[in-house]
Every structure is written in structure tokens, then in C-alpha cells.
Image (cartoon, rainbow, N blue to C red):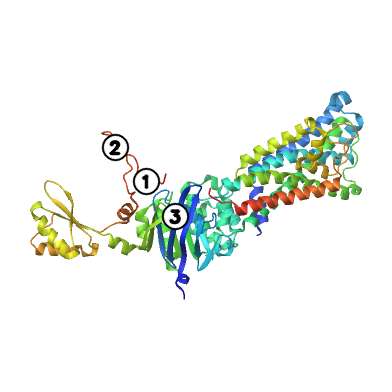
Amino acid sequence: MTASATLALSTTDLRKSYGRQMALDGLSLEVPSGVVYGFLGPNGAGKTTTMRLLTGLIRPNSGSISLLGRAFTGSQHDILHDVGALIESPSFYPHLSARDNLTVIGATGRRAAKARIDELLELVGLTDRAGDRVSRYSFGMKQRLGIAVALLNDPKLLLLDEPANGLDPVGIVNLRDTLKALAAAGKTVFISSHILPEVQQLADIVGIVAAGRLVTQGPLEELLTSQALIRVKVCPEEVAGASEVLSKLTGGGSIETQDPDAVWLSARIAANRAAEVNRALVGAGIYASGLEAGSDLESLFLQLTAPPEPTMQPTRPGAIPGWNSGVES
Amino acid sequence: MSLAIVGIRKFWTRSATLVSILLVIGFVVLEFVAVGAGYRSGGTASTGLDKDTVTWFLSFPTAFDAILVIVYEFVAIVGLIYIATASGSEWSWGTLKVAVARGESRWHYTVSTFASLSIILLAGMLIAFLVGIAAVVVGASIAGLPVGNPADPAQFAQVAVKLARCWIALMALTSVGYAVAMIAKNQMAGIGTVIVYFVVSILSQALLPDIIKQVLKYQPFNITADAIGLAGPPTGGVASSAAAVEPNLALLISIGWLVALVGITALSVERTEITG
């Protein structure tokens, strides 16, 4: 079996520009089969462009795409029969009911069976409102219906662009359970989201893009561990001792912040070694007044996608600072 | 279920479909009732039409041609706008995007969508035609003229052929609205172009020199009217008594326009980037 055969999705040096604006600048992704892949990036990073390329809505300037082990250039419609997608906002015929929309949409691509439509309406919790016109649906209900559309063909690969948008907490939990169940059943889920804690709960692997380029990609646990920090709060007179202890454990500790009463030291140590750190400090006669362990996806995301130079303008006292979203201008 | 049949279902249930059909029916009824009522109240002086022309309008079998002329005129205008609206919304609602992402062939989707709209067009035309028959009976009754026999079996085959020609002509004409809306990815562009096209076509007949008219008579708005092959009223009226282009040739050219416009649309959709 070749390496590409075990990948549900891969892109190689994918480039796409809209006029002069480069949306993707050599994106190479590798998504193994049967995983939940979190595709993250700030606004304008190229996530939706990637989704459009993966579904043949647009064509790349250069580079290649492989879906389910086959090269995809946008014209192999049959490949997409095994791919389910929810791209940008859910799109429907507003004058039709949810059931009729699924019937009409199910007539495109590979035909969907009626029984499958009933099953999906039940799955996304719309059975009771299945006969109502979609124009009367809330955004969250449309989002549920959009997820049903993506699942119509029982796809092997699911591409979801912000699927949790507009969902209520129950809907988010249900979505998470559904996606986990799909991955457990061997399906591959490629999910783009801004709700980082949600991705952290779901994803096995994450890829982070910024300015059209892949910043990092790998198993979530490994990425979090590699970026993990243990932070220790000690008295100023214990800084030297504590630094020595941390250095032994990691190869170096650094002073992160300082205040009149205590000092925070931080070191790159896996969160599951927090007890070991505490024990080593106590062994050296240092009693930390604070110890924080771990790293979250949000910190990792912000760290990796931060623009090289600050873009916030100086503000007058009391002014609300501007956003620094990293959007390409 | 095939894409075209499903398409009929999705378009038929739109309120725009019902409104468009009601609009055409209203115009058709108004036309024949007005002719009948005008003739009754003031004779030929009131309608501006001589008795032979009024009889052409309100007595079968010639009234079949009158109904087809009126139905064609109104379905052409309303149908062009309707089809531009319906097809443009495939872009604005994002439903074309969903179909393509599901692995549907863009070419197949574009042609099937037009096929669905053509069936809706046929249904609207037939409904308007049947209502037109009733309107002629009412109009003749108001005018006090003999209506003839609208159920004469000897006329059925001829009327059926004319209806078929009318449908083909309408498909060819409305494919203009379809092409503009689908290529521009915008229903308003389709509607705007249709209105401008309609006005320019009318004005060009009055204002342009003959040599240009000789060329323009082959453009869809003119050639499709000639393709139906209807005999006009004895004098005056809405249809010209002599077609500019021989009907069978006009029908062939209309079919050519139809195939070309739908083909160009499909080719354009095949190549375009779906970013909305």
C-alpha cells in the first residue's frame, strides 16, 4: 500500500490567487483516513478557498489534490460522490421544506434514497419541522439541515466549514458526538472552525494555516505537548533555585513576568509532568505559590498565526484597541 | 428521480411561478373581454378594429391563432423575466454550489435546469391557452358575435402543431434570459437585459433603416415570432399578416438559437469559478 492510499485527502503545493491577491501559497496538507482533522486559521488565511478547491468549485493555479486516493482536478465528479461538504453558509431553496430540499438536493450527484432522508432528519433533530419551509428556519436549523445535506451520501470524507456556526449548545454536543461516531466508523472528517475549544475536543490532527501557507500540521497531542508550558510562581529570592530545578527538567527556564511579590517562571514541559515539577521544587526546598500546567489550542493558534509585526495602532488612553485578525490586505 | 423532474417540482412550487401564470392569464382574459366589450359598446369605432378583425379574434377556428398570438406575446415577456429570476436564484441561493460539490456535472445541471423551466413554460402556455379559449367564448358572448366551435376535432391536429411551434419559439426566446442570468450569475442582470432587449427590439422595428432590419429579423425576439407560423388578422391587430421569415426556416433558426444559447450557458457554467 502506498502512502497516498492511506490518506483520505492530500494537497501538494496548492496555489490559488484571485487577481493579484494570493489566497493559497503552496499549501500541502496530509489528512489520514479515519481521523478528525481540524483545519484552523485566521480570517483570510485561505480555509474557505481550500474547501472550494477540494469540492471542485474553483480550480487551482498550480499544485495537486488527491481525494480518497485518487487525483482530483475538479472534473472527476464521481470522486465527489463519496465526499460530503458543507461550505460557507448552508444553501437551500427557501420555498421548499427541509424534506423537499433533501429530496431535490439528493437528486444531484449520487442519488440519495428516501429512507436516508428520513434517517438524517431524525439525526439532526428536524423530523418535527421537516415539513416547514426552510425560509422559516433559524440559522441554527439551517445549519443542521446543511449537515444533513453533507451526510446524504454516507460519505467517506466529510468537509465541514464552520459546522458549529449558529448551533445551540445541545446542537454542538450532538454535532460533536456525530462527528466522533463517524470517525470511529472509519470516515474522515475535515473540519474548519474558529471555535478552538470545540476543535480541541474533536480533532485528532490539526493543520494551521496563515496567509495561505501551512504553519504547522500534526497530531493535536504532539503539537500541544511541543508547545506546552509549565508555569511556576515563586518568591523573588527563590528565582535562581527554581530556575536551576526547571533547567534540569527541560534545559532552561525563563522569567516570563515579574511583579513586586513573586516571579512567574515558565518552561517547556509537558502538562502531565506537573507533579514531577512540583516534587522537584519541593525537593530543592522551594514551595511554589502557583503552578499552571498545559497548553491549549487557542494559545498555540495565537502563537503560530501572530503576524510578524504588530499592526495595532497606538491608541489614546481609554480607547478600544483595534482587532489584529491577521487578515491579508 | 431524474434531475429535470425534481427541477420541475422545485420550480413549480415557487410563488413566482404562480404569480407569472396568473399574470399571463389576466392579460389574456383582459384582451379578449376588452375586444368583446369594446365592440359591443361602440362597434368598430370603439375598438379601432374592423368587424372582420374582431371576428378573427372572437370566432373559432381563427380565434385559435388569436389566442396563440396573445399567449405568445405575454408568455414571452413574463416568461423571459421568470426564467431569468428562477435561474439566477440558483446562484444567489447557492444551490448550484451545493450540486457541484455533490459531484453533479455542471453541464448536466445547467441543461436539466433549463429543461425543467421549459416544462414549466409549457404548462404555463397551455393553461393560458385553455383560459384563452374560455375568454374568447366570453368575449364573443359580450360582443354578440357567433363564437364558432372551439371543440371542432378537425382543428385539433393543426392547433397542436401550432402549440408545439409556439413552445419551441418560447423556449428559444426565454433561453436569452436564462443565458444572461446564468452567465452573469445574477437574476437582476438577466431581468434588466430582458427588459432592455424587449424595448430595443420594439424600437428597432420603428427607427432603424431597412438594411439593419433585414439583419435584426434573425435575432431571437423577431425570429421566434415568425416561427409559430400564425395567420394574422385580416387588417391591423397584434400579429403581422406576413411573417418576415418563412415559418419553417424561422423555426429552424429558433432551434439554432435555443441550442446555441443553452450550450453557451452550459459551457460558461462549466468553466466559471463558484465563489459565492
How packed is label 3: few (under 14 Cα within 10 Å), some, or many (20 or more)? many
Q: Nearer the viewer, residue B229 or B23?
A: B229
Provide the secondary structure element on which disc 3 rests. Answer: strand
Is residue B164 visible to us here? no
Q: Nearer the viewer, residue A159 or B13?
A: A159
Report the disc number at residue A65: none
- The residue that disc 2 covers is A314
Mark 3 or 1, nearer chain start: 3
Above or below, B91 relative to A118: above
Residue at position x 12%, y 59% in the image:
A242
Mark 1 or 2, nearer chain start: 2
* Image x and y of residue A210, in percent: 39, 53
Amino acid type, residue under disc 1 in the picture: Ser
Of badges 1 and 2, the one in the foreground is 2
* Image x and y of residue B225, in percent: 80, 41
How packed is label 2: few (under 14 Cα within 10 Å), some, or many (20 or more)? few
**CB atoms of marks 3 and 1 within 8 Å:** no
Q: Nearer the viewer, residue A110 or B215?
A: B215
- In what quadrant of the picture does the N terminus of chain B appear? bottom right
Above or below, B55 relative to A274: above
Q: How many marks?
A: 3
Residue B180 falls in image quadrant: top right
Amino acid type, residue under disc 2 in the picture: Pro
Residue at position x 54%, y 54% in the image:
A58
**Chain of residue at mark 1:** A
